[in-house]
Image: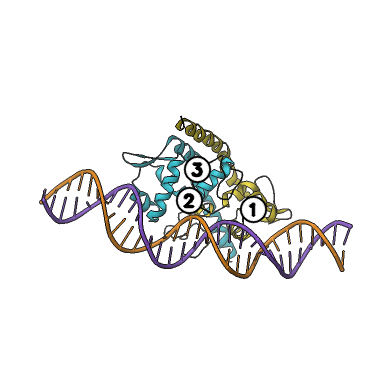
Chain colours: A yellow, B cyan, C purple, D orange
Amino acid sequence: MAERTPVPGQPVRGSKTGKPIMALFDLLGRSWALGIIWQLSDGPLTFRQIQTACENMSPTILNRRIKELTASGLVARGDQGYQLTTQGADLFVLLKPFGAWSKDWADGLAAHRAQEER
Amino acid sequence: MAERTPVPGQPVRGSKTGKPIMALFDLLGRSWALGIIWQLSDGPLTFRQIQTACENMSPTILNRRIKELTASGLVARGDQGYQLTTQGADLFVLLKPFGAWSKDWADGLAAHRAQEER
DNA sequence: TTAGTGTGCTACATAAAGTGTAGCAATCGC
DNA sequence: GCGATTGCTACACTTTATGTAGCACACTAA
């Protein structure tokens, strides 16, 4: 299956339905996509800054993600580098709580693991 | 790089930081992970029901995702099949708004596209 | 008891996606 | 002009996902 930017209303990565939520999950479910959005929430970053912020992800894939996220209207290129669009920022609002949740999750898993070791 | 369930507090998929949010993004950023959680929010589903609900995703990868999500404490196996744990349900609460957002996003993209065609 | 169903898988060959290093052309400040 | 930085692209390689087939087990009705 050829890679393609997921577009709601059209079949996606093997999907025949093209349900918006599935198109979104396909887009966000690609490596670093969520990470890129997360990093850009603090303000514009250059190509290489994103790369550095995302554990030196490969430029190949960063380039691809940028194109996809741009085509999807979540990211745009500005003077200071790449930045979230209004829509991208909207999405980040939904994404933000994941930060706190992930910490609780981490704590919970650590506790669970500690208990198992007894 | 060998596949491994992302665990917060430990390096993840090439990451050296192990920040919880990045571990979470790694876990959710694998194919169908978000879709599986989404589908399970309506109640328990059997292995094959999940497969069907997720556009007949390959059993190979469904099995892997289930193991990962189980190890991460988001999914558990019950009498009626696989289901979200309390934590998984908590996560879904955060995920739920993405449904409405994705529809707006789809509409926006469609409008944008219609405009470009003039 | 046997034939049919559905279940949760696993095997395996193939295709797609991601990695990591190298490096190039363009732009910037000097 | 010179070096530094930028946004990339090429390419060989590894990892991840797909899709089909099928197996072992449990249940059910004949």
Q: Is residue A5 visible?
A: no
- The kind of residue tagged 2 is Ile
Q: Is residue B25 visible?
A: yes
Q: Nearer the viewer, mark 1 or mark 2?
A: 1
Q: Quadrant of residue B55?
A: bottom left
| Residue position for label 2 | A21
| SS label for mark 2 | helix
Which of B95/A53 is in front?
A53
- The kind of residue tagged 1 is Asn
| Residue position for label 1 | A56
- The kind of residue tagged 3 is Leu
| Neighbour tally class for label 3: few under 14, some 14-19, many 20 plus, Cα within 10 Å | some
| Residue position for label 3 | B95
Q: Nearer the viewer, mark 1 or mark 3?
A: 1
Q: Are marks 1 and 2 on the same chain?
A: yes
Q: Chain of mark 3?
A: B
Give the Cα separation between the discs numbered 3 and 2. 10 Å
The answer to whether residue A97 is above or below residue B27 is above
Q: Position of residue B84 (x, y in %)?
A: 41, 39
Q: Are marks 1 and 3 on the same chain?
A: no
Q: Position of residue D1 (x, y in %)?
A: 87, 68
Judge from the rendering whether residue A29 lies leftward or rightward of residue B63; answer left or right.
right
Give the Cα separation between the discs numbered 1 and 3. 28 Å
Q: Earlier in the sequence, mark 1 or mark 2?
A: 2
Q: Quadrant of residue A97?
A: top right
Give the Cα separation between the discs numbered 1 and 2. 29 Å
Which of A38/D11 is in front?
D11
| Neighbour tally class for label 1: few under 14, some 14-19, many 20 plus, Cα within 10 Å | some
| SS label for mark 3 | helix
Q: Position of residue B117 (x, y in %)?
A: 57, 66
Q: Chain of mark 1?
A: A
